[in-house]
Image (tube, grey):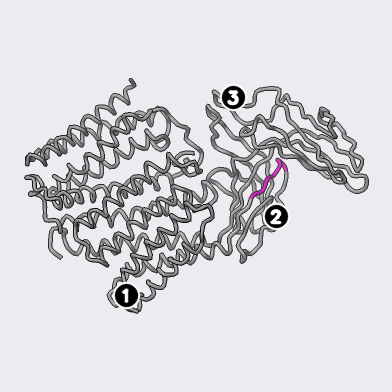
Amino acid sequence: MNALASLKLTAAAIALFAAGIAGSYVAPEPALWAIAAPLVLLAVNLAAAIVRHPAFRRQAALLVFHLALGALALLAAAGQLMSLKGRVELTTGEAFAGQLLEGEHGPLHLQRLHRVWFVNEGFEIDYAANVKRGETRNTIRWRDEAGTERVSVIGDQTPLVVHGYRLYTTPNKGFAPVFTWQPERGAARLGSVHLPSFPAWHNVQSAEWTPPGRARPLTFTLHLEEPVVVPDGRWRLRLPVRHRLEVELDGARRELAPGALIDLGAGRLRYEGLTTWMGYQVFADWTLPWMLAAALLAAASLAWHFWARFSARPWQEEA
Amino acid sequence: MSAELQILWAALLAYVAAGSLAIGALVFGKRPERAILALLVLGLALHGASIGLRWQRLGHGPFITLFEILSSNLWSLSAIFSLAYWRIRAIRPAAAFVMPILFMMMGWLFVTHPGEGHFPPTYRTAWLWVHVGFGKVFLGAVLVAVSLSGVVLARATGWRGAGLARLPADERLDDLALRFVAAGFVFQTLMLVAGAIWAQDAWGRYWAWDPLETWAFLTWLALAAALHARLAFRIRPPLGAAMIIAVFALAFLTFFGVPFVSTAPHKGAI
């Protein structure tokens, strides 16, 4: 028990923890055990020290600091098991219906994303010289937990927070040609093709889409016929007034104007016009406020401990 | 040369004069402490004016380029050390051990291009101030501990100059250095917490083990290990001093190395 409760073990376990982090940082495949094992050792060491050393128990602030650190580690682990991270892209005017483009979540995540509803109503982004992105102002229509519809502007530091999820705008956004797909049988559907992020990929404004019933994709290419990007000055991202949309179909190229129809056998595709899309990052972790509380408690109790210890005796005096 | 740069170079001259005087005083056993303090205050005032002029011109604080980060940290480190120099008279000769570090930063600042950078939208938050402010207090507190550690190590090498003899015994300096390191540990903890709050809304995650986060946390662990080791092993002042200097070196590299070497998103400026 004495060995388990010793400060020497604490120092050694901290050194192992640091080595595990540094090793995981440089290794191509981070090893979870290299971080988890020293943490378990530190937890055992702390528990043993609390049991074994009455002096440690008497130093309330120091004890609270260590317990808060333990709570922080446990909450971080719980967050890994229950959190969700993902991304989604929405065309202007499109509603989020609970489906992620890609994402990952812990095995114990309580899926409530289907409750989240919001519509991307468009965005404004100003750029400085040398294509430096400024503030993002994305107007959204959304429903709160009570079902009341609201309009808000989100972007950068301001996410949409609803049903425990945090939805952030991202630097990924761009142009999106909108189409109506009219199949041979059934109802027509409105959809869009998201061209690569703009202005990051301003030279490669092409994307593919494979219509139902076809093996080969269509390739859509947007040609801007006016300068949208102003490399040396300030500008605002906007839809180009003059542009051409080109489609490549079975090796043949064709230009599309709004209202143009393409007959694809299994249905007809009608080009409705050009709009924009915005990429969103989705994050959920119920531990966040508790982790903040634990971290602040740790910092406050540490300050309290040092203050009590050092104010008891001037530094010039012998201990 | 612009007025803000002329004022900055004048400030550096004042710092250099203060530092040279402090080193000379230690070597020759003199006590020009009032002159050193006056020169430090003059340097701080001029340096603050230069930072203020640049701030007014660009419309944002010194947070973006290497030039701005070096300049603002040089100011905050000088300010915190000057405060300690003013308040704790008994340790004033220890200034000679801090000035070479500040000289190095001044030299680096001198050869760094003073061009301007883009102030990204993720920096438009009060958490930038909180995070950076705590970081500056942390590094400043450890710098004061480094000055005391320098004295302890100099004595351990057998140097017993007139200036060193005036300083308190190694055990007392070691105790005071521990207090500054402890204060630094609290502020570094707060810096990490504020950084995580900022990162959550700036990048949609509170922690992602990016290079700057990883090295900042390793520095925190190094400080925690040093504090535990002092209790566990009854470390003698010279070894304790060496550990403080090692922690400062790690923190210094994290502050001024990683952000400008890393290509990851969290690199000081995006």
Q: Nearer the viewer, mark 2 or mark 1?
A: 1
Q: Quadrant of residue A191?
A: top right
Determine whether label 3 and label 2 are within 8 Å by CB: no
Query: Which of disc 1 and disc 3 is earlier in sequence?
Result: 1
- Tags 2 and 1 on a common chain: yes
Query: Residue beneath label 2, please?
Result: A98
Query: Which of disc 1 and disc 2 is earlier in sequence?
Result: 1
Query: Residue beneath label 1, please?
Result: A57
Residue B167 screen position, x and y as percent? 11, 50
- Residues packed near mark 2 inside 10 Å, few (<14), some (14 to 19) or many (20 plus): some
Residue B227 screen position, x and y as percent? 29, 61
Is residue B219 shown left or right of residue A173? Answer: left
Q: CA distance from mark 3 to mark 1?
A: 65 Å
Residue A49, numbered label: none
Query: Residue beneath label 3, please?
Result: A230
Residue type at mark 3? Val
| Residue A105 position (above or below residue A7) | above
Of the pair B16 and A229, the residue shown nearer to us: B16
Residue type at mark 1? Arg
Q: Quadrant of residue B6?
A: top left
